[in-house]
Image (cartoon, rainbow, N blue to C red):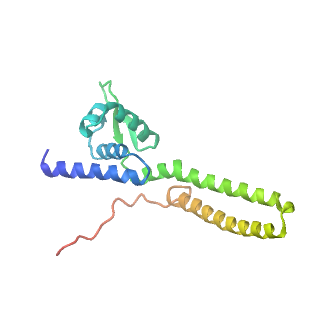
């Protein structure tokens, strides 16, 4: 492989490893995804372990995680008994999968906690002193603001990342960035 291709591959795969940490995934998961994404052909667990110089057990465990997140898929190869994998190339789909599985759940949990808090405050209303009632009213006002925030976040995630009324991102194939330097 030409040195330029090797350098670009290595830096991109390493970049995916660093980027994975930002989203709460391991460096290995990011590098595996990057390796698969830059491979024109599906890769076996052995090939992935060799390319990344990590154990086959680590590759296998992390590939299961990538599969659960919808970031990689097992591919059947005619005449092969080994498992082969390819990356989900649609990064919007990867982001939708992650947000659907994690962030939407967390927003839902936050809303449930807030609802429970409102119920507890309202059920204790008759037992509160006037001073405690003022504090309870303050809490309820703040909780109301938090509920509104999380409901908007829930709506935004649904709109951006694929609800029935989601944005149509089909026509976007790439973003053109201005080049630096003289033209």
Res 74 quadrant in image: top left
Residue visible at 27% across and 47% down?
Answer: 38
Write the residue at 77% across / 60% down: 121
Up-down relation of residue 10 to residue 45 (above or below): below
Residue 7, horizontal then vertical, whole percent: 18, 51
Q: Residue furthest bottom?
A: 182
Q: Residue at x 23, y 70 (%)?
A: 179
Residue at 86% from the left image edge and 60% from the top image edge: 127
Q: Quadrant of residue 66?
A: top left
Give left or right: position of 31 versus 8: right
| The one of 40 and 132 positioned closer to us in this rendering | 132
Tell me the quarter of the image containing the N terminus.
Answer: top left
Position of 90 relative to 168 (above/below) = above
Q: Quadrant of the C terminus?
A: bottom left
When the figure is inspected, residue 183 is found, relative to residue 97, above or below; the finding is: below
Q: Position of residue 98 (x, y in %)?
A: 47, 49
- Residue furthest to the left in view is 2
In depth, the one of 52 and 94 nearer the eye is: 52
Residue 19 image offset from top left, x and y in percent: 36, 54
Q: Left or right of 104: which side holds 127?
A: right
Disc count in the image?
Answer: 0
Image side of residue 35 versus residue 105, left or right? left
Where residue 50 sits in the image (x, y, percent)?
24, 35
Answer with left or right where residue 87 lies relative to residue 68: left
């Amino acid at each position: 492989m030409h040195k330029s291709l090797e350098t670009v591959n290595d830096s991109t795969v390493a970049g995916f490893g660093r980027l994975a940490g930002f989203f709460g995934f391991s460096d290995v998961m990011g590098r595996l995804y990057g390796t698969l994404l830059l491979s024109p052909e599906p890769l076996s667990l052995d090939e992935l372990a060799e390319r990344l110089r990590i154990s086959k057990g680590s590759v296998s465990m992390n590939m299961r995680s990538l599969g659960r997140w919808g970031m990689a898929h097992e591919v059947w190869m005619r005449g092969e008994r080994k498992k082969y994998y390819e990356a989900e190339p649609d990064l919007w789909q990867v982001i939708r999968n992650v947000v659907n599985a994690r962030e939407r759940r967390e927003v839902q949990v936050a809303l449930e906690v807030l609802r429970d808090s409102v119920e507890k405050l309202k059920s204790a209303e008759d037992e509160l002193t006037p001073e405690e009632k003022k504090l309870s009213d303050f809490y309820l006002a703040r909780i109301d603001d938090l509920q509104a925030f999380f409901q908007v976040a829930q709506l935004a995630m649904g709109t951006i990342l694929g609800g029935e009324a989601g944005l149509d991102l089909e026509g976007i194939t790439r973003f053109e960035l201005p080049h630096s330097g003289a033209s």
